[in-house]
Image (cartoon, coloured by chain):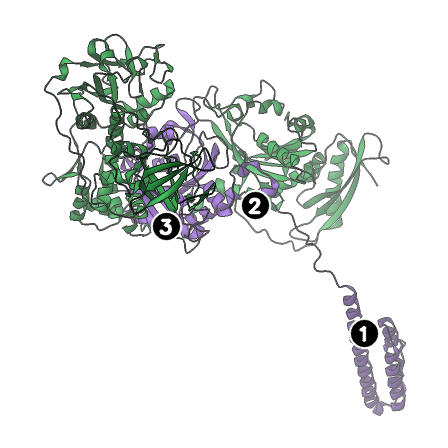
Chain colours: A purple, B green
Amino acid sequence: MKEKLAKIREQALTQIKSCDTTEKLNEVRVSILGKKGELTSVLKSMKDVPAEERPQVGQWVNETRQEIEKVLEEARTAMEAAIREVRMKEEVIDVTLPAKKAEIGHRHPNTIALEEVERIFIGMGYEVVEGPEVETDYYNFEALNIPADHPAKDEQDTFYVNGDILLRTQTSGVQVHEMEKGKLPIRMIAPGRVFRADEVDATHSPSFHQIEGLVIDKHVTFADLKGTLAEFAKELFGEDTKVKFRPHHFPFTEPSAEMDVSCFKCGGKGCRFCKGSGWIEILGCGMVHPHVLEMSNIDPKEYTGFAFGVGLERIALLKYEIDDMRLLYENDARFLKQF
Amino acid sequence: MNTALSWIKAYVPELSCEDQEYCDAMTLSGTKVEGFERLDKNLDKIVVGQIVSIEPHPDATKLVVCQVNVGSETIQIVTGAPNVQVGQKVPVVLDGGKVAGGHDGGPLPEEGITIKAGKLRGVPSYGMMCSIEELGSNREMYPEAPEEGIYVFEDDVEVGADAVELLGFRDTVFEYEITSNRVDCYSVLGIAREAAATFRKPFIPPVVKETGNGEDVNDYVSVEVKDTDLCTRYCARVCKNIKIGPSPKWMQRRLAASGIRPINNLVDITNYVMEEYGQPMHAFDLDLVAGHKIIVRRAMDGDEFQTLDGQMRKLDSEVLMICDAEKEIGIAGIMGGENSKITDEVKTVLFEAATFNGPNIRKSAKRVGLRTDASGKFEKGLDPRNAEAAINRACQLIEELGCGEVVSGMVDVKVPLAPLRRIAFEPERINSLLGTEVSAEEMLEIFAREDLEYDAEARELIIPSFRQDLVGFADIAEEIARFYGYDKIPTTLPSGEATAGKLSYKLRIEQKARDIAEYCGFSQGMCYSFESPKVFDKLLIPADDKLRQTVTISNPLGEDFSVMRTVSLNGMLTSLATNYNRRNKNVKLYELGNIYLPKAVPVTELPEERMQFTLGFYGDGDFFTLKGVVEEFFESVGMHKKVDYDPQAGKTFLHPGRQALIVYEGTVVGYLGEVHPEVLDNYDIGTRAYVAVIDMPAMIPYTTFDRKYTGIAKFPAVSRDISMVVPKSIMVGQIEKVIAQRGGKILESYSLFDIYEGSQIKEGYKSVAYSITFRAKDRTLEENDITAAMKKILNGLEQMGIELRQ
C-alpha cells in the first residue's frame, strides 16, 4: 500500500509540473483527488485493509493528500501571479492623456471676494444681513444725517423713481434698518447692490456693490474700529498688510476716516497698482454719528459704534488684477472661467 | 484746490519742511494732499544774462550771434528769437543746464530738456536764452512775457541772479482734496491755519487795517435785501478814482500757481481775496448801477439775463438776482451781468461781499447751467463774518497797491449774526469714544492751536464762526483724534458680549443655489437691475401684461437703463448672446438677482424685490438638463418631495411646446423651458437655448437644512418591469402619479427606463417602460403582496387608455 501511495504521489507531482494552465491543474486535481480520483479510490478500498492497519494506512493517505494539495495550491498561486504580471504589462496606459473633468462652473469674482469678506466677519461674530435696493430718501439720506439740500445728495448722483423713492446709492441705509429693530448689541455686515448715475467705463458702472459694516455696543471705541479693520485687512490681503487711517468726512460718522492698506502687490515699495505710493485706498469708516444713533432711538451717551463701507468691485478688481470693470457685467465665459 | 506752498508760508513763516513731509503730515491731520509739483523740477542752471552785443550769423539770415553777460563771464549764444535787443536782461540756461519744455509750448517732457554747448550752423553757442514756454509756463500766467521770443526781465534785476527764483518758480504747488464739511479750508488762510496747527507753528494771518478817505459810503450807494432767506448778509464798499493796470508780480505769481490768470489789478485783487479768504467778491462799475442802489431779490419766472460772458440765461423765481434801481445786474453768487461789467474805463467800483444760501446757489447754478468758481464756494454755505473780513482786505489791497481811493465805511445789510456756538468740553467722554488716554491739558493745547477758545468756567469751547463743521461732541472728538494723530490711537478689538456670526437663512439658500449651479457646470454672471422698456418687446410680452408695469427711473442714464426689471431673462439672454457672438461653445450661466415688482403704478411705495435664481445655457444638453439642475438644487435644500411640471406655463418668451411651470406641493416656484425661436432671433442667438427661473421667495418656505436618518432597508426589494403603449397625449408625469398613488406602502421607487415612438408603435401612441421597486420595512415581501400592488397600478393605467404590452 505504501508503495502504491508513493507512486500516486510521484505521478501527481510530475503531472502538476507539466501543467501550463489553471484548467489543466484542475484536471489533475480531479483525476487524483476528485470523487473518482486515484487517491479517493484508495480511500474507498480501505475496507479491504485489515482493521489493525487501517489507522496507519489512513494516516499515509492523508499525508499524501495534504502534500498533493499543497503542491497544487503552490502551483496555482504561482501560475495566477504570472498571468497577472502578463496582464498588467499589457495594461500600461499613457498617464499624460487628458483628464476627464466634471465641468463644474465658476463663481463670479465679485462673489468670491464677497465670500472672503463674509468669512472674515462671520468669524468675528458678525451677522450678514440685507436691505432693499429700492429705498426711501429717509433711509438712504435723511436718517444718515444727510438732510434735504445736503450737497452729498448731489455728489452721489442719485437715480430717483420719484421725489421720495430712489435706487439706494449706498448700503449704509441697512444700518438704519438694523438699528431700528432695537436689538443691541449689533454686529452686522450688509453686502448689496448700489446705484449711482455714472456712465459705464473701465472704472465706473451705474450699478456696483458695497459691503456695509456696523457695530453698536456699550464702550465701542475708535481704537476698536482701527483694530477690527486692521484685522480684516490682514485676513483679506495677507498677514504682512499694514493699514493707515486718514481723517475724512462722511455725514453719518464722526470722527471719520479712510483706510489705506500697504500695497499687497509690491509690499509698499510703489508699483502701478498703488500708483507708486505704496498704499491703496480701501474703505471709508468712522464712529457712528451721535445724531444718527438718536434718530434710530439709540442713546448716544450709553451706546457708541462704528461703521464702515467697502466697495466690493474695488476689492475684486485689485485682488484679481482685473483691469476693466465692464468685464464684471459682460459675463463672457472665458472671463468667468478664470475664477 | 491748488496753492503754492510759498503762499501758505506767508502766514506760517516758521513752517519749514520737505514737500513730501508736508504732504504726509497734512494728509494725516485731515487736509488731504492729492499731489504736489515743484515748479522748478526741470529748471537748472538758469541765470539772468544781459545781452552785450548782437551780430548777424554768417551763414543764416534768421539767426543772430549774441554775447551775453551772465555775471561770472560773457558767453556767446546763437539764437533765432526775433525780439532780442542789446541791453535786455533775459533768462539764460547755461551749458549742461535744463529747461522744462520747448519754445512751442507743447506738452512738457517728463524729464525736461538738457541744454548743451554746441554749434548752430557752424557758430559755437554756449547756452540758450529762454522763452516763458521753455520755462514751463505760458503767456496766460505771465502776461508780461512777449508774444514771441525770449522772456525779458525788468531792468532792475541783477545780472547773474537766479532767474528761476525771480520768476517765482522756486516753489511747490500742492493740490488739496477738501472735504465738503470744511468750507473754511477752501481758502489759503484756512489751509495755512491747518498747517500751523499740524506743525505746531504760529499762524499769522494778514493784519487788515481800517481804510478810507473819510467820505461816507452811504452817500455813494444804498442796499436793500428783499429776500433775506437767500441772502443773510450783503456788504458793499466803494472805491473811486480807479487806475487800472497790472497787479504786482508777487500777486500775479500766487494767482498763477493757483491756476488763475492774472488780468489787471482790480480783477486780480478780487481773485486774490477769493483765494485767500475763500469769500467770492464781485465788482460792479458803480456808474452803471442805476440809482446807485442795490436790490437783492428773486428773479421772475421767464426772465432772461445776459451774464458777463455774453450768454443769455433763463431765470426762474428761485434764482436770486442782484438788481439796481431799474434792472437786474447780476445773478447772485454765480456771475455778474454784461450790463454792469467793469471795463478799463471804470472810475468808481462797487465791491460786493455777500453770504448767500448755499443750497439755493447750488440749485440755481444747475438750472441756469453755469457753475463758476464763485458759485462753487457759495454753495458750500459761507461764514457771514468772513464777508466783512474779505471786503476790508480787498479795500486794503486797493489802497496798498495804488489801484484807487477807498471810500470810508461799509454798507452792511444782514440778518443778525448768530452768537458763536459753544460746545461742552468732555475730555473723559472723548477718551472713551476714541479709546485713548489724552490728558485734558493736551486736548486744550490742541484746541488752542486751532483758534478754538476755551471758557474754563463754563467748561465750554467757543467755536469760531469759520468752523461751521463743529456742531457737537463728536466733532470735537474728531479734532482731538486728528491732531493727536489717528496713527497714535491704539488698535483694539471690541470687547462686549459675544455675538454669533452667521449668514441670514435666505443667504444660506442662495449660497446653496450657487454651489449646485456650479457643480452642474453653470458659471455665475451678474446683470444690471435696470434695462430698456424695449426688452418687453424682445421677450414677446403682450402689451397689457402686468410685467410691463415697472418701477421707472425718472433721471436714467438713458432709455437702456430706465426701468427696473420685472423679469430676469433679458440679462441672461443678453449674456448668452454675447457669448454666442464671441463663438464661445457650450455656455452655461446662472444669475442671482432681484426683480422689482411695483405694488401700484405710478409707484407710491417701495416695490417688492424678489430674488430670482436664473439659469440659462446653449450647447450640450436640453430641457431635461435644466430640470436636473432644478431638482438637484431642491434636493440640496431639503425639498425631497416630487416636483411637478405643468406644461401650461403660458410664457410668451418660451417655446410653446417646451415649457413648464415648476410646482412644488401645489405652489408655483418657477418655470423653465426652451427659449422661443423668435426671441432667440431677437437676441441674435443662432442656436437653441434653455432657461430656468426659480422664484426664491416662493420656494424658500419649503426649504430646510434639517436632515433625518431613516435607516437602511434590511429586507430585500423586489422589482417589476412594465411596458405600455400610451396615447401620445398622456405625459409620463400622469403615469407616475398613478404609480405613486396606487403602489401602496410597499412602493419604494419607480424609474422610467425606456420611451420610444416610431415605426413599431401604432400612430398616435408611444411605448413607455417602467421599472417599479417594492420593499417592506419589516418583512420580506411575498409574491401576493406584489401581485396585489401591481394589479392596482395596472388597473389604474388601463383606465387611462393605456395598453399593457406582454
Residue kind at label 3, given as amino acid type: Val
Residue A162, image x and y in percent? 42, 22
Seen in the image, is B537 located left or right of residue B461? right
Q: Which residue is mark 2?
A: B515
Which of A275 and A21 lies nearest the eye of the viewer?
Answer: A275
Residue at disc 1, secondary structure = helix
Q: Which residue is mark 1?
A: A79
Task: Give the chain of mark 1.
Answer: A
Alpha-carbon distance for marks 2 and 3? Answer: 34 Å
The picture quadrant where one finds residue A156 is top left
Residue drawn where x is 41% and y is 25% of the image: A165
Whether the residues at callouts 2 and 3 have beta carbons within 8 Å, the answer is no
Mark 3 neighbour density, 10 Å: few (under 14) some (14–19) many (20 or more): many
What kind of element bears circle 3?
Answer: strand
Q: CA distance from mark 2 to mark 1?
A: 51 Å
Task: Pick whichever of labels 1 and 3 is earlier in the sequence.
Answer: 1
Q: Where's residue B330, x and y in %? A: 29, 16
Query: Hey, what amino acid is under mark 1?
Result: Met
| Mark 2 Cα shell of 10 Å, populated few (<14), some (14-19), many (≥20) | some
- Asked if the residue under mark 1 is in contact with the one under mark 2, i.e. CB atoms within 8 Å, the reply is no
Residue B374 drawn above or below residue A72:
above
**Is circle 1 on the same chain as circle 3?**
yes
Please indicate whether residue A119 sits to the left or right of residue B731 in the image: left
Q: CA distance from mark 1 to mark 3?
A: 72 Å
Residue denoted by label 3: A243
Q: Residues within 10 Å of mark 1 (few under 14, many from 20)?
A: some
Rendering quarter of residue B283: top left
Q: Quadrant of the N terminus of chain B?
A: top left
